[in-house]
Amino acid sequence: MECICSLFILLVSANAVQVKVGNPKEKDFVPTKEWQTVQPGQQIQKGLHVRMNLEKGTVEAKQIDETNSDSSAVLVLDQANEDKPALDKEELKQILAALKNDDRSESESDPKDLAGQRSYEEIKKEFDTLDFGVKTEAEIITELHKDYMQTKDDKRKVQILVDLEYYVHQIDNGLNFLKMGGLRDIIIPGLNSSFEEIRLNCAYVFGGCVQNNIKAQIMAYETNIIEILVRLIATDTVEVKNKCLYGLSALCLQFPIAQKKLVESGALSEFALIVSQRDPILSKLQKKIIVFLYDLVLEPELTKQNLQYYQNQNETDNVEMYSEKLRQYNVSNIKGQLLANNWCDIANTYLKRVYEESITTGEFDHDLVEKTLYFISLFRQNCREHFTNSKIVIEQFRRSYDLLANDDDSGYFKKNPNLIPKI
């Protein structure tokens, strides 16, 4: 349906009206019941519907339909206006503009139209007064700390600890938690709680708090947290032991001073007792202990390499830093302490047990074998006689991994047989 912006004019004057669109050239307009274009100079009769097509710029007219009279937008011309000249385009534009302004002013002044509406300033003021409850993570940690101290419900405390663990992994959050007394008020008392879930989650929160966070590690070092964790590893359930070992490793790795306190706490003897046991329930914990000890022994070796590199580069600041770090590692002397605690025999026996379990089950725990071989390789110079007694076992590992390496495109299985000649 064609959209036409039109002005309907009902002519009720007694005489005909001349529409002046141009020079008079055509004859009188003959109306019908259909819209027709009024040619320039034509005169139209009275009582016709007349409209101007604003898109085309033409005037159109037709006979009035008595049965369906359109009363919208009708302009009535009375007898007094019959002698006035016809409207031109500019006058029609002014009339239409006036009609639009009248509609707008009426809408703005009508109270009914404004009912239920608010101004921009009112809406803005209302939003300013709203409290959406947006809190910073520091505020959340403070509230969790406060809630933990006030509640007497052990299950509620466990849920608070779960929420805290989510936040303290972030370095600033972990440090803020310790500064507000998290160790004193929550972690240390929680590790001594009679409720297992609280002990477990406190160890987990502590590990997340100090991991890769040197300032938090220093704050924790100044407490007796290492002794508490070692005691729980020796006496508590397997689940709690695992979380406590996680907390110990998070605190001691890359922190040689804490490693000295770890040795003094008797942790290496407790680790030896755990790894020596033939208990499937402890297998996961034993594997974690082997990995943890491997990392502790490897750190001084890597520090030596870094020190030599910076000495060759004549970078004085880094040379001083790594020299001091190596001095601290030598004080803790983790490798020497392991040898003194008979870890040559322990590692040798553990390797045999790993192989026997692999043969019995028909499945190799490749990750466990890899970690064990790496750990033993660090002691190859000191434990050569002990490993000679396991020559058959080591040779069996070599054959098994040689077969796997032949069908391995990724190169993963080539790493283990490459370690065996070093052992």
Image: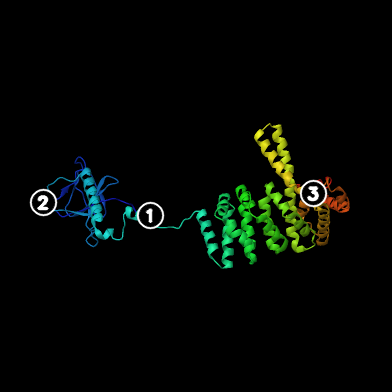
Please tell me the numbered disc located at residue 418. none
Q: Amino acid at mark 2?
A: Ala
Nearer the N terminus, badge 2 or badge 1? Answer: 2
Q: Position of residue 38 (x, y in %)?
A: 23, 47
Q: Position of residue 363 (x, y in %)?
A: 79, 59
Corner quadrant of residue 23: top left
Image check: 144 left or right of 77?
right
- Answer whether labels 3 and 1 touch (C-beta < 8 Å): no
- Residue 165 seen from this side: no
User: Mark 2 = which residue?
Assistant: 80
Q: Nearer the viewer, mark 2 or mark 1?
A: 1
Q: Which residue is mark 1?
A: 128
The spot of residue 122 in percent (x, y) is 32, 55
Circle 2 SS class: helix
Q: How many other residues sit within 10 Å of disc 3, few (<14), some (14-19) or many (≥20)? A: many
In percent of width and height, residue 404 lies at 80, 51
Mark closest to the chain's N terminus, 3 or 2? 2
Decide which of 251, 170 is in the foreground and name it: 251
Foreground: disc 3 or disc 2: 3
Query: Residues under labels 2 and 1: Cα distance?
Result: 62 Å
- Who's the residue at 66% across and 51% down the image? 251
- For the residue pair 164 and 262, the one nearer the viewer reads as 262
Q: CA distance from mark 3 to mark 2?
A: 113 Å
Q: Is residue 110 above or below residue 255?
A: below
Q: Residue at x 48, y 55 (%)?
A: 135
Label 3 to label 1: alpha-carbon separation:
65 Å
- The type of colouring in the image is rainbow
State left or right for residue 36 relative to residue 186.
left
Say which residue label 3 marks. 416
Label 2 crowd (10 A; few <14 / some 14-19 / many >=20): few
Q: Nearer the viewer, residue 227 or 129?
A: 227
